[in-house]
């Protein structure tokens, strides 16, 4: 299992990539999409909507079940990946690239520091499996 080191991770299996302290791109980890199997639908968050960290903001459905996607940090949704509406399988095919879900303007930059590193997330996933 690949755990990219250029992103941070949440316990609810979202990844977060920041290029600066004001904006983050969010997606679902490879571990999560493997558990889901074939993603068939994603309800994207609404542009301009504000969320607090750990709020549910979107829904992902697979052939197995439906799950909430949570905002890893507080802020406002500034972009969504509209490609997922026609091609939700991008989450399975390229979870850390073309399968990104939304971008958020970060209201509380310090919240990023509370997220897990790749090593921490790998350990977390191993504990979940045992």
Image (cartoon, rainbow, N blue to C red):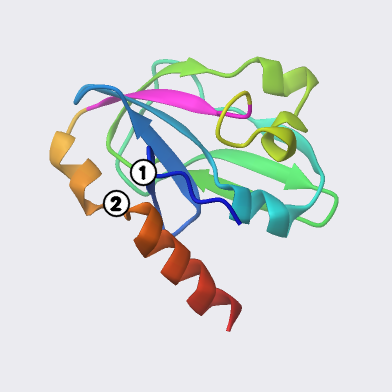
Residue picked out by circle 1: 72
Residue 68 drawn in magenta: no
Residue at image point 19% right, 47% down: 113
Residue at image point 79% right, 19% down: 86
Where is residue 11 shown, x and y percent of the image? 42, 60
Q: Quadrant location of residue 97? A: top right
Residue 103 drawn in magenta: yes
Secondary element under disc 2, as helix, strand or loop, is loop
In the image, farthest residue toward the right: 63
Residue at image point 56% right, 28% down: 100
Where is residue 82 shown, x and y percent of the image? 64, 15
- Most foreground residue, 106 or 121: 121
Q: Is 105 drawn above or below residue 30 in the view shown?
A: above
Local packing at callout 2 (Cα closer than 10 Å; few below 14, some 14-19, many 20+) is some
Residue picked out by circle 2: 115
The span shown in magenta is: 99-106
Q: Quadrant location of residue 48? A: top left
On screen, residue 105 versus residue 87, left or right, reads left
Q: Are marks 1 and 2 in contact (CB under 8 Å)?
A: yes
Secondary element under disc 1, as helix, strand or loop, is loop
Residue at image point 45% right, 33% down: 26
Closer to the chain start, of discs 1 and 2, is 1
On screen, residue 69 versus residue 82, left or right, reads left
- Most foreground residue, 2 or 113: 2
């Amino acid at each position: 299992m690949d755990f990219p080191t250029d992103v941070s991770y949440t316990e609810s299996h979202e990844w977060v990539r920041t290029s600066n302290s004001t904006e983050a791109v969010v997606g679902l980890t490879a571990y999560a999409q493997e558990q889901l199997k074939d993603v068939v639908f994603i309800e994207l968050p609404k542009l301009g909507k504000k969320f607090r960290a750990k709020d549910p903001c979107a829904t992902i459905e697979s052939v197995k079940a439906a799950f909430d996607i949570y905002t890893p940090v507080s802020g406002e949704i500034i972009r969504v990946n509209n490609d997922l509406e026609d091609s939700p399988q991008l989450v399975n095919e390229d979870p850390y690239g073309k399968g990104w879900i939304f971008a958020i303007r970060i209201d509380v930059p310090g919240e990023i520091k509370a997220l897990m590193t790749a090593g921490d997330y790998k350990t977390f996933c191993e504990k979940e499996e045992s």
